[in-house]
Amino acid sequence: MNEIDALQLPGFATPVRRPRRLLTQNSRLKAIGVYNWTLPALRARLPDGQTITTCPAAGVCAAVCYARAGAYTWPSVRQRHLANLAYVVEDLTGWEQAMRAELRQPRFARDTWVRVHDSGDFWSDPYTEAWLAIMNASPHVQFYAYTKEVLRFKRIVEPARPPNFHWVYSLGGKEDTELNPAVDRVADVFPTEEAIHAAGWHSQKDDDRLAVLGPAPVGMSANNLKTQKRRQGNRTLGEWQASLRRRRSSVRWPLPAKDP
């Protein structure tokens, strides 16, 4: 049975391959029995020429994003992620219904965990609200996510949090200043596992779900990608974003001279 069916979507010149199974498992998450839903990282162009920014609050993280390298760049993987996004953009209601139906299948009957996005983020209000509806309709499933959409979550998600939804705010985004680590659960990417422990943070290395279930604040080590590791250096993404913000705030553009 094919995983993806071709489908002509409104506004698309050529058929887009729509996923038949929405939830998949990458190798790391499969090892702990977690399913995941994925979108293209940062932004993507759909077959009709429309460009969708899937990580609106991304900051310095975009320069070292693991989901823009390695296996994520393989044509078959990129096609799958693009199909996911096209489905959401062109038929959000149909996608929501399909996700609800899939989560009612026997393989998700109990003790199921779903990571929402191992790439991409909650990029719009309607998309976020659709996920909340899915979660409320699937109380037997535990959902979790890393997100940089701080303002959107504080406006939409926090006031109506489904009891089976767990998340952590990931530093390195444009909305870091909206976070209070004394109140908000936060995670940061460190250059090494040793750096996490030296800072007194708590690693999620043994199980990705520790990001939302274990002690906080949460640290994760940078992926072993040479270019990305060189760009990050010995700083965390949160430190890098804060440094960039300080540099930008220190710039004083000269005012134009007044006319005599």
Image (tube, rainbow, N blue to C red):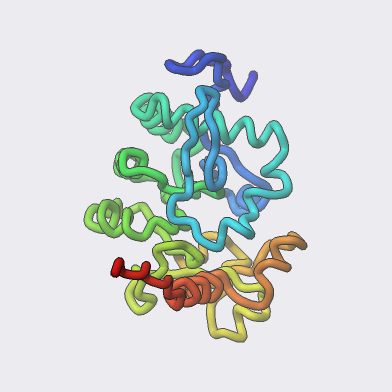
The residue at the far right in this view is 226
Residue positioned 62% across, 66% down in the render: 206
Q: Is residue 139 left or right of residue 108?
A: left
Residue 47 position (above or below residue 133): above
Q: Is residue 196 above or below residue 59?
A: below
State whether residue 63 appears in this view.
yes
Quarter of the picture containing the N terminus is top right
Between 175 and 140, the one lying in front of the other is: 175
Q: Please state if 172 lies on the left or on the right of 26 as rendered.
A: left
Q: Is residue 6 above or below residue 162?
A: above
Which residue does the image show at 49% across and 17% down from the upper left?
12
Q: Residue 131: x and y, percent? A: 36, 42
Identity of the residue furthest to the left in this view: 159
Quick check: can you spot residue 112? no
**x, y percentage for residue 196?**
60, 78
**Which image quadrant for residue 32?**
bottom right
Task: Identify which residue is drawn at 55% across, 63% down.
Answer: 60
Q: Is residue 252 left or right of residue 178?
A: right
Task: Please state the horizontal and vertical placement of residue 19, each as a whole percent of the image.
Answer: 54, 26
Number of on-image labels:
0
